[in-house]
Image: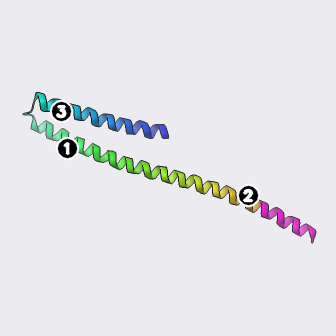
Amino acid sequence: MELELLSSRVNLNHTCLKLQVSIDEIKTKNPHRTDLINSMEQSLHELKKAMIIYQALEKEFRVARQMNFNLEKLNLELKQDVKDLKKIIEFNNAEL
C-alpha cells in the first residue's frame, strides 16, 4: 500500500508539472490562445486542489492505520491477560 500511495502522489505531481510546462509553452508561443490557456489553468487549479485533498486523505489513512495497529496490539495483550486470569482461576479452583 505504501508503494501505491507514493506512486500516486508522484504521478499527480508529475502531471501537474507537465501541465504547467505546457501552459508556459503555450503562453510563450501562442499567447493569443487565451481560451486554451484559461482552460488549462483551470484544470491545473483543479488538479492542485485534488492533490491537497489526496494529501489530507493520505494523512488520515496513516493515522487510522496506526490506530488500528495500536488497537490490535491492545486486543492481543488483553486476550493474553484473559488466558492468564483463566489459568489463575483454574489453579485456585483446583486448590479448593
Q: Between marks 3 and 2, how big is the CA–CA gap?
A: 63 Å
Please tell me whether mark 3 or mark 1 is closer to you in this view: 3
Q: Mark 3 sits on what residue? A: 24
In x, y percent, where is residue 10?
38, 36
Q: Between marks 2 and 1, how big is the CA–CA gap?
A: 57 Å
| Disc 2 crowd, CA 10 A, few/some/many (<14, 14-19, 20+) | few
Please, what secondary structure does the residue beneath circle 1 have? helix
Q: How many marks?
A: 3
Q: Earlier in the sequence, mark 3 or mark 2?
A: 3
Residue at the spot x=48%, y=49% of the render?
A: 62
Q: Main secondary structure of the magenta part?
A: helix
Please, what secondary structure does the residue beneath circle 3 have? helix
- Viewed as shown, does residue 49 lie left or right of 79? left
Q: Is residue 88 magenta?
A: yes
Type of the residue with mark 3: Asp
Highlighted magenta segment, given as a residue range = 84-96
Type of the residue with mark 1: Gln
Residue 42's disc number: 1
Vertical placement of residue 52 versus 20, above or below: below
Farthest top residue in view: 29
Q: Mark 2 sits on what residue? A: 80
Please tell me whether mark 3 or mark 2 is closer to you in this view: 3
Farthest bottom residue in view: 96
Q: Is residue 73 magenta?
A: no
Residue 84's disc number: none
- Viewed as shown, does residue 22 lie left or right of 53? left
Q: Earlier in the sequence, mark 3 or mark 1?
A: 3
